[in-house]
């Protein structure tokens, strides 16, 4: 579908937000799902779409966060209010926040992984699920926390909150704070998510990670976004690989190999 760009704003020094008029997507998207956007309006380059978590929704609109790190996102950064972008979605599986298998949701965020957390925050509030948010960055200028709540900050340089990694902050709190039956919901850089799964194993708590990866079609046809499954998942499903676009982007930590 063609979605008109209705607003554009800067979020941090390297992130900006596109608000698109997309009533069909806005009315059906669930927390953790994403859209696939064609980063051009006429030429054939870039050829492939780019996936973006749905950052926020409203009456007839959705927002996505853009971080420029290649030609596709650079092209999107040039889009002007009034332009129409080719968008498909919502795609992927949502966060499994309503499983009833935990009592406290711990949202663990790093970098542009914040994109999938506002919708999960809203879902927790709407479902009366207690939650806490742990957010890590190199320094305070990099936080994009406009839609987050109950945030515990960690920065590498100590400019805001705990000085050190957000994983170390959460580890300290898990030892000292009595969170009732917690579950981790994690999105961020791969090293952080890998560390989060180790932390979850250390405290024997469930952990779900939302992967960010390159993909082409976004609907499982091209098979271009595989992740290796664990031995237990292979035995359970018979699949050596899952696709991030259709089986994910969120996976339980026991399902895939980091």
Image (cartoon, rainbow, N blue to C red):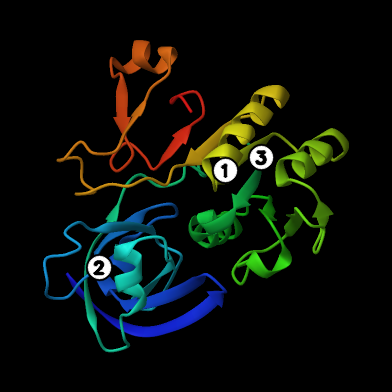
Q: Nearer the viewer, residue 82 or 12?
A: 12
Q: Are marks 1 and 3 in contact (CB under 8 Å)?
A: no
Q: Across the whole image, how many numbered discs are drawn on residues?
A: 3
Q: Nearer the viewer, mark 3 or mark 2?
A: 2
Residue at the disc numbered 2: 39
- Vertical position of residue 177 compared to residue 161: above or below: above
Q: Reading the chain from its start, which is encountered first: label 1 or label 3?
A: 3
Is label 2 in a helix, a strand or a loop? Answer: loop
The quarter of the displayed image where residue 77 is located: bottom left
Q: Reading the chain from its start, which is encountered first: label 3 or label 2?
A: 2
Give me the residue at 63% from left, 35% from top: 196
Q: Are marks 3 and 2 in contact (CB under 8 Å)?
A: no
Estimate the x, y position of residue 172 in percent, counting from the top left: 83, 38
Q: CA distance from mark 3 to mark 2?
A: 40 Å
Residue at the disc numbered 1: 185
Task: Tell me if I can see residue 101 in this picture.
Answer: no
Residue at the disc numbered 3: 103
User: Within 10 Å of the Cα at label 3, are there few (<14), some (14-19), or many (20+) other Cα atoms?
Assistant: some
Estimate the x, y position of residue 225 in percent, counting from the top left: 29, 38
């Amino acid at each position: 579908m063609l979605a008109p760009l209705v607003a554009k704003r800067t979020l941090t020094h390297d992130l900006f937000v596109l608000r698109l008029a997309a009533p069909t997507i806005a009315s059906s998207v669930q927390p953790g799902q994403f859209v696939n956007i064609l980063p051009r309006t006429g030429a054939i380059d870039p050829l492939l779409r780019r996936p973006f978590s749905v950052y926020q929704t409203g009456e007839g609109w959705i927002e996505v966060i853009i971080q420029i790190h290649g030609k596709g996102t650079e092209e999107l950064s040039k889009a002007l209010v009034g332009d129409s972008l080719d968008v498909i979605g919502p795609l992927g599986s949502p966060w499994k926040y309503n499983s009833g298998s935990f009592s406290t949701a711990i949202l663990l965020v790093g970098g542009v992984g914040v994109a999938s957390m506002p919708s999960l925050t809203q879902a927790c509030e709407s479902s009366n699920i207690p939650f806490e948010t742990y957010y890590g960055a190199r320094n305070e200028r990099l936080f994009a926390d406009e839609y987050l709540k109950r945030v515990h900050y960690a920065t590498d340089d100590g400019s805001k909150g705990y000085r050190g990694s957000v994983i170390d902050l959460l580890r300290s709190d898990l030892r000292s704070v009595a969170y009732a039956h917690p579950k981790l919901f994690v999105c961020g850089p791969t090293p952080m998510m890998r560390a989060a799964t180790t932390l979850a194993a250390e405290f024997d708590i469930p952990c779900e990670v939302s992967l960010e990866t390159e993909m082409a079609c976004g609907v499982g046809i091209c098979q271009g976004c595989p992740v290796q499954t664990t031995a237990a998942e292979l035995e359970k499903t018979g699949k050596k690989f899952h696709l991030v676009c259709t089986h994910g982007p969120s996976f339980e930590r026991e399902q895939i190999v980091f």
